[in-house]
Image (tube, rainbow, N blue to C red):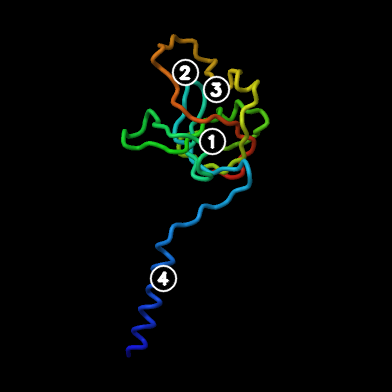
Amino acid sequence: MKAIFKKTALCGIIVLTAFSCEKEEEILPPNQAKGRIIETFRMCYGYWVMIEVENPKGIGEAALPRNEEPWKNYKNAIGVPYFDRIPELNTKAPDSIGTWLHFEYRELTNEEHHSNIFVDTSFHGICFTNIISPNATRYIITKIIDYH
């Protein structure tokens, strides 16, 4: 009876240990990331989407999207242009809030950095100087591997 109890207890400890450990972060190939679109911006805020990157950590920066609850902030946010602004992307993936993405990305070229790729050129209203876009490290998505 004691032997059965000991074996059951040992198995229980092993199972609990296996499920209580933190999962290791999946190692993605260079310049690949996974994340969810958390905000979209237009008009005075620019013309881009904000993605909270789940993996890899550290490519973005802390952000507080304007439509979220005040307690909900993000630690690894990046900004990318709306997908239709990236001609080589050629995707049917939606660039709307809540879309989960697995994608390849790259840094902006000097030309892109100084272009209107993140600016809402369809908006001709007056923007007050106190209206600014939130901070987010900016990238270009080069390929969407998966989405849902």
Residue type, label 1: Pro
Q: Residue at x 58, y 22 (%)?
A: 117
Give the quarter of the figure containing the N terminus. bottom left
User: Which of the labelled discs sits on residue 21, or is there none?
Assistant: none
User: Which of the labelled discs sits on residue 15, or is there none?
Assistant: 4
Q: Residue at x 37, y 80 (%)?
A: 8
Between residue 19 and residue 46, name the one nearer to us.
19
Cβ–Cβ under 8 Å for marks 3 and 4: no
Between residue 117 and residue 7, name the one nearer to us.
7
Indicate whether 29 appears above or below 140.
Answer: below
Residue type, label 2: Met
Determine the secondary structure under disc 4: helix
Residue 70: where, in percent of width, then height?
Answer: 31, 33
Query: Tag 2 or tag 4, which sits nearer the N-term?
Result: 4
Residue 120: where, in percent of width, then height?
Answer: 52, 18
Q: CA distance from mark 3 to mark 2?
A: 10 Å
Query: Tag 2 or tag 1, which sits nearer the N-term?
Result: 2
Quarter location, residue 16: bottom left
Instruction: Check disc 4: other Cα within 10 Å, few if <14, some if 14-19, many if 20+.
Output: few
What residue would you read off at disc 2? 43
